[in-house]
Amino acid sequence: MKFVLAVAFFILISLCVEEGCSKEKSSKKGKGKKKQYLCPSQQSAEDLARVPANSTSNILNRLLVSYDPRIRPNFKGIPVDVVVNIFINSFGSIQETTMDYRVNIFLRQKWNDPRLKLPSDFRGSDALTVDPTMYKCLWKPDLFFANEKSANFHDVTQENILLFIFRDGDVLVSMRLSITLSCPLDLTLFPMDTQRCKMQLESFGYTTDDLRFIWQSGDPVQLEKIALPQFDIKKEDIEYGNCTKYYKGTGYYTCVEVIFTLRRQVGFYMMGVYAPTLLIVVLSWLSFWINPDASAARVPLGNVFQPLSRGSGVCCIFIEMTVGETRCKKVCTSKSDLRSNDFSIVGSLPRDFELSNYDCYGKPIEVNNGLGKSQAKNNKKPPPAKPVIPMAAKRIDLYARALFPFCFLFFNVIYWSIYL
């Protein structure tokens, strides 16, 4: 009997513990979820009746209790004109590899919805600042970015949406977005190029019979002073246009675009690319003033400059030509040495020769026959030493000293006249 009571007591405790844990888990899940907001049209009459009659909440409930967000304003009437403007918070640098750029913007849209006109008994300002949770209860344009690669909406610490409802029924929505947009680049004139990057705002589902996007008058795109590492962008270089598109089978869709003109900073590449390669080419010409016999000093000089000049194809060609000149001169020097040596070829040995009493340094040799000094025979002195540097190698160096700088200067004149 005691055993049965113990088992029953153990089972009862286990059930209580399990029930408590399940309640704790459910409470944690409930805390993690946001409270779902119900539009006035989805609320019961009892919930609406609890709102004070003279409150702003009651006015909004009266506006939206019979409001259908699935139907556009002026249904079966004139198209809705949506005025668009953009404030650019930050402008990321253009990526040449992926051909895109990233911006952080405030996108603002304004349109008129006659169903949202504030009642005459409303006493207050001309506009109501409404909580972002109410945004889902309203009809809104189906705007998207036609050249978008990726985008994200910001919700830290709250959803970054600003919503105004004006007395005459105008609705103003402002939201913060980060967007990566494609930008096809023409790098023919790199690094003196100018790029034109677009941002296209288009309607996804409504044709021009139902919806039209219009740029705000004045400055539709507001741009603060932005510093980019490689480009300059100015407010005066921003262009606006209309890019309404036709799709076969569905019709015309409204579209507006803004074009940013970005000019690359040449000074950035002057110090980082042009100046180093120019110095490398000029320093490679030092080998023209080095003795041709000092091949150990000439060849490594060119080999060191070769990897440093890979950033420029023309500079690399000049370096290779300098190394080629050194090798050509070395070959000429070797051939001249062979021709100048009377004993380098067996067939050239003289058949008749006479002894000389001079050593290899041109000093007379005294011969002693044991009885006395013999007089030195007045034979010929050895021929003078051949010059170390052949004339062909000298001429190659002289020509290179004038030809290489002239060709490089001529190339620079043509290059800068085309690109500038």
Image (cartoon, rainbow, N blue to C red):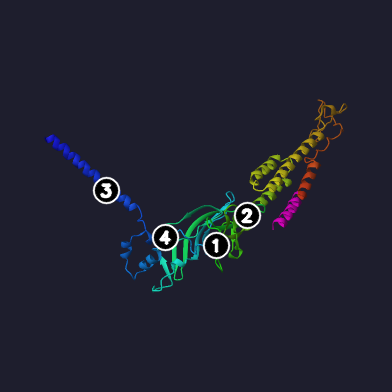
Please say if 18 is above or below 32: above
Q: Which of the image's four quarters has the N terminus?
A: top left
Which residue is tagged 2? 269
Residue 137: x and y, percent?
42, 60
Secondary structure of the residue carrying tag 3 is helix
Residue 5: say if magenta.
Answer: no
10 Å crowding of disc 1: few (<14), some (14-19), many (20+)? many
Q: Which of the image's four quarters has the C terminus?
A: bottom right
Q: Nearer the viewer, mark 3 or mark 4?
A: 4
10 Å crowding of disc 4: few (<14), some (14-19), many (20+)? some
Which residue is tagged 3? 23
Which residue is tagged 1? 213
Which residue is tagged 4? 137
Count numbered badges in the picture.
Answer: 4
Q: Residue furthest right?
A: 352
Residue 375 falls in which quadrant of the image? top right
Task: Give how far apart the Cα atoms at labels 2 and 3 are.
Answer: 66 Å
In the rendered structure, which disc, 4 or 2, sits on the residue that comes first in sequence? Answer: 4
Please say if 56 is above or below 159: below
10 Å crowding of disc 3: few (<14), some (14-19), many (20+)? few
In the rendered structure, which disc, 3 or 1, sits on the residue that comes first in sequence? Answer: 3
Secondary structure of the residue carrying tag 4 is helix
Instruction: Judge left or right: residue 259 versus residue 363.
Output: left
In the rendered structure, which disc, 3 or 4, sits on the residue that comes first in sequence? Answer: 3
Q: In the image shown, does 35 or 177 lie closer to the viewer?
A: 35
Q: In the image shown, does 155 or 130 lie closer to the viewer?
A: 130
Q: Taking the image as drawn, is residue 361 in sight?
A: no
